[in-house]
Amino acid sequence: MSRFRAVLDGIRQRRAKAMGLFVTNGFPSLDATVPILHALDRGGADFLEIGMPFSDPLAEGLPIQRSSAHALAHGVRIVDAFHSARAFRKHSETPLVLMGYINPILQYGVSNFCEAARSSGADALIIPDLPLEEAELVEEPARAHALDTIFLMAPNTSDERVRAIDQRTSGFVYAVSVTGLTGSRLHHQMDVVGEYLARARRLVSRNPLLVGFGIHNAAAARQLCRHTDGFIAGSALVDIIESAWCDRRLRLGDRLALVEQFARRLASGRES
Amino acid sequence: MKGPDDRGRFGPYGGAFVPEVLVPELRFLQEAFNSAWADEAFRARYHRILKDFVGRPTPLTFASRLTLALGGARIYLKREDLCHTGAHKVNNAVGQILLARRMGKARIIAETGAGQHGVATATVAARFGLECTVHMGVEDMRRQRLNVDRMRLLGAEVRPATSGTRTLKDATNEAIRDWVSHPRESYYLIGSVVGPHPYPVMVRTFHRIIGDEAKRQLIDAEGRNSPDMAIACVGGGSNAIGLFFPFLVDRSVRLVGVEAAGEGLDRRHAATLSCGTPGVLHGALSYLLQDSEGQVQPAHSISAGLDYPGVGPEHAFLKDLGRVEYVTATDREALDAVKLLSRTEGIIPALETAHAIAALMRMAPDMAVEQVIVLNCSGRGDKDMNIISKEDVAI
């Protein structure tokens, strides 16, 4: 079993919930990313996702589209994800997931990518445009370098397919909360999301089940966590980071404190 | 060569690299398409609408003065510019809207570059009473103002795509995001032989009528059922595949696809097959204009319909096989070609089509006078008059 899976299982054994937090690498700057990761770590994240920006991120809503475009405009490259991971890893054992679209990984070379990811301290990969049917491209090289590959399920995924995802995923099953983009608004449809997650819970038996997309606050996290082993937030954090860094009156310490505080508030959603 | 396999692969290219939400939708789409195309009644309906509404068959026009002017092979124009709405795009729009109705969808989503696919989609959506949203880059909305007005008049919502390069690539991103957000009620009516499986094969199926008709018409015109050369412009590649498909198995037919060289291949261009490398964009593995980091690079062409950094996966395969030659024409050459066709044949072609004519101008003179070329005259140029009159001071 992977180190990452062991961490998630440990949380489950304590009857607690896991919180994963996402940031776009190099947003608002490469200098800021590692301090932000540490702030989130202090704020209680059980694992962190480093988003590798892509020019055409199909599954992303506006916050992550904007943060990705900003990072690319400032010259952020794939190797910078490894640099961020390695720098973070020097001071923390919190698991790290790399999130990115398939094309940059293909161009880097899948096997080289997995090797570099692992040696820089990453634990797992999430590739949102790599469904099971195309996944063999990555699964074997990832396994060879001891990286988990996390697959996503969605509300319109059939029961049979959810079981197949549960068979093939490693780390956890990522339940996308809605048929929509990251950062979608959930508040009108909490009941529907709850029913879907209850179905997911019945079907996913081999892996932890985490929910993500559209979780903006602790109340939403708390409500959705009832059916899952934890949650992931991303767009809401990107928004917080954007507003903290836009406020010119704030110094770096103040900004990081805001980020840490936001993580801490979200973390309270883990408690029922 | 017929491809694709059941995973949507043309050789190594194609596939379906999409978010999980779209996987079940693509499967429904494929099942619906397979059952529809196997259904005689569906095909009869499709062909009847192409005849009564679109105006098919389109003529195969012998271009006598162009032939004379170039002094080589005999040139025929497959007159897709005479289709209702002014371009070949409507063949596919008719086929897919019938499919959308069969699937019980209430709303149509489309992307458009030059606006021809958007207009074709808005037209069939109006014809069948379906709600329609067309995503279009703001840069293209500016360049193709007339088509924006046409789509709105037809009752479609034209939604400006403001991300990235604000052209076809970004309009396609927005259309896919719209589909990801509303998969149950919406049908994504893609406009070229691009995107995830089964779109490339489906769009090809709805456009092969171009080549099928040309083949029959050549028998009447020349007493032969294949030309020596077939030539068409390639952005995503739908009009080219439509013309080429029936001739792919006939190795005696030279097939030429013409990409947009923009300002020149060493400057800004949209020559994906000529200068790109394999990569994944919009759900398919194909050639792509990208940097060494795998970030998609902006394309450039004077023609909004060719201004796309990707290309259909079947074209990628045909290039690797060497079955189709892919050449290029610059913005300047396309403008010259517009003028030549207008003045020799009385046909004002779309700027997209003009790229094929530009390559023809280089190739036809070297061919023998008894040889026959079919050029896909994929669209008419009314929509481009602003650009043509602005760019071409000597008009």
Image (cartoon, rainbow, N blue to C red):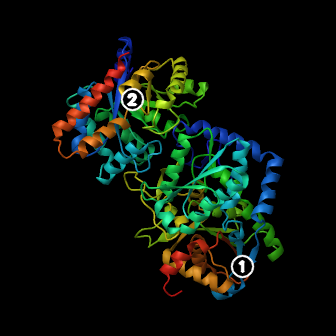
Q: Residues within 10 Å of mark 1 (few under 14, many from 20)?
A: some
Identify the residue at horizontal 42%, vertical 58% (top origin).
B297
Chain under disc 2: A
Is residue B275 in view from this perspective?
Answer: no
- Location of residue B354 in the rendering, given as x and y in whole percent from the top left corner: 58, 75
Answer yes or no: do the residues labelled 2 and 1 have beta carbons within 8 Å?
no
Q: Residue at x 53, y 39 (%)?
A: A134
- The residue located at (58%, 37%) in the rendering is B23
Alpha carbon distance from label 2 to label 1:
65 Å
Horizontal and vertical percent position of residue A266: 33, 26
Determine if residue B19 is in view.
yes
Q: In the image, is residue B89 above or below residue A112?
A: below
**Lateral position of residue A48 relative to residue B165, left or right:** left
Residue A227 lies left or right of residue B97; in this view the side is: left
- Disc 1 on helix, strand or loop? loop
**Label 2 SS:** strand
Amino acid marked by disc 1: Gln
Look at mark 1 in the image and give the residue it sits on. Answer: B371
Closest to the camera, between mark 2 and mark 1, is: 2
Closer to the camera, B298 or A121?
A: B298
Q: Quadrant of the C terminus of chain A?
A: top left
Is B59 rendered above or below residue A212? Answer: below
Residue at image location 51% in from the left, 45% down from the top? B177
* Residue type at the position of mark 2: Ile
Q: Position of residue B323 (x, y in %)?
A: 62, 62
Q: Which picture quadrant has residue A41?
A: top left
Q: Which residue is mark 2?
A: A232
Pick whichever, A256 or B327, lies toward us.
A256
